Image (cartoon, rainbow, N blue to C red):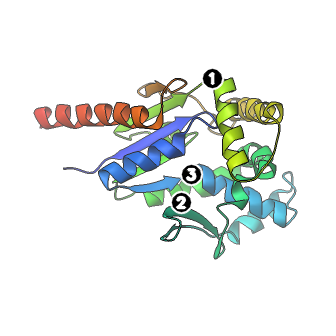
Amino acid sequence: MERIIIAIDGYSSCGKSTLAKAIAARLGYAYVDSGAMYRAVTLYFLHHYIPLDDAPAIEEALHNIHIDFHYNPILQRNETWLNGESVEEAIRSLKVSNLVSPVSAIKSVRTTMVHLQRKAGKNKGIVMDGRDIGTNVFPNAEIKIFMTASLEIRAQRRFDELKAKGQHHTLEEIQHNLAERDRIDTTRSENPLIQAADALVLDNSLMNEQEQLEWAMIQINAFRSAKTQIG
């Protein structure tokens, strides 16, 4: 079966990564968390006190940032590594969440990350999630999914996730964070979050993870079947 690119875009805390990982596992594809890449850059900026309005400092920092993904056999999960160190937990903190959208809006940051993302998908057989995967990174992706859910449900999911990790924040604090990220993501000048014209829309407000995966696989199998008939 010919390998394809599957692009998943959508709002914060919609479960994009969860669905993308599940699809990749079902198909035996590689999975790339583009959001984790921007979070890793944000973490680096925080640790090195890089001002977001200092273009030369940002350019220098980007040359010193090396991001990799490695599978942790003990925890049985993929982890994000920044300059040789696992930062999977650190990049999920609310401190990083509060800054990742402004960092992602910086043109030089997006240019660098998009180059790395396209390089990762040059041989296809990949599932990637983010904000502009189907509109900018892989505009010719065979399958594009745009995910959404109500702000209240997304905030509750994020609240539960952080609580399980021992991070305690109020639901109101998280909802405010998500609303602000939505605003920045959809209004930034560099590749804003928008639904691709040919994207399949998935509102998962009332769906569990298994239902989302089955929905996605129906779309993927329908595409494959149609392509086989045409071929």
Q: Which quadrant of the figure contains the C terminus?
A: top left
Q: Residue at x 41, y 37 (%)?
A: 210
The one of 111 and 69 positioned closer to us in this rendering: 69
Check the image and report above or below for 110 versus 45: above
Q: Secondary structure at mark 3?
A: helix
Q: Position of residue 169 (x, y in %)?
A: 82, 42
Left/right placement of residue 73 relative to residue 84 reads left
Residue 185 position within the rendered picture, expressed as x and y whole percent measured from the top left: 69, 35
Please name the amino acid that badge 1 sits on: Ser
At horizontal 74% and vertical 48% (from top left) the residue drawn is 100
Judged by depth in the image, the label closer to the viewer, 1 or 3, is 1
| Mark 2, secondary structure of its residue | helix
Identify the mark nearer the N-term, 1 or 2. Answer: 2
Q: How many marks?
A: 3
Report whether 10 appears left or right of 169.
left
Q: Which residue is mark 1?
A: 150
Query: Which class describes the residues within 10 Å of circle 2: few (<14), some (14-19), or many (20+)?
Result: some
Q: As shown in the figure, which amino acid type bears the numbered disc 3?
A: Ser
Q: Which residue is identified by label 2?
A: 116
Return the disc, 3 or 2, that comes first in the chain's sequence. 3
C-alpha gap between disc 3 and disc 2: 10 Å
In the rendered view, does 169 fall on the left or right side of 214? right
**Along the line of sight, the residue nearer the viewer: 85 or 74:** 74
At horizontal 48% and vertical 29% (from top left) the residue drawn is: 196
**Distance Cα–Cα, label 1 vs label 2:** 31 Å
Q: Residues within 10 Å of mark 3 (few under 14, many from 20)?
A: many
**Numbered circle sitting on residue 132:** none
Query: In the figure, 113 relative to 4: above or below?
Result: below
How far apart, in angstroms, are the residues tagged by discs 1 and 3? Answer: 22 Å
Name the residue nearer the viewer: 55 or 45.
45
The disc label shown at residue 34, or none: 3
Res. 74 in view: yes
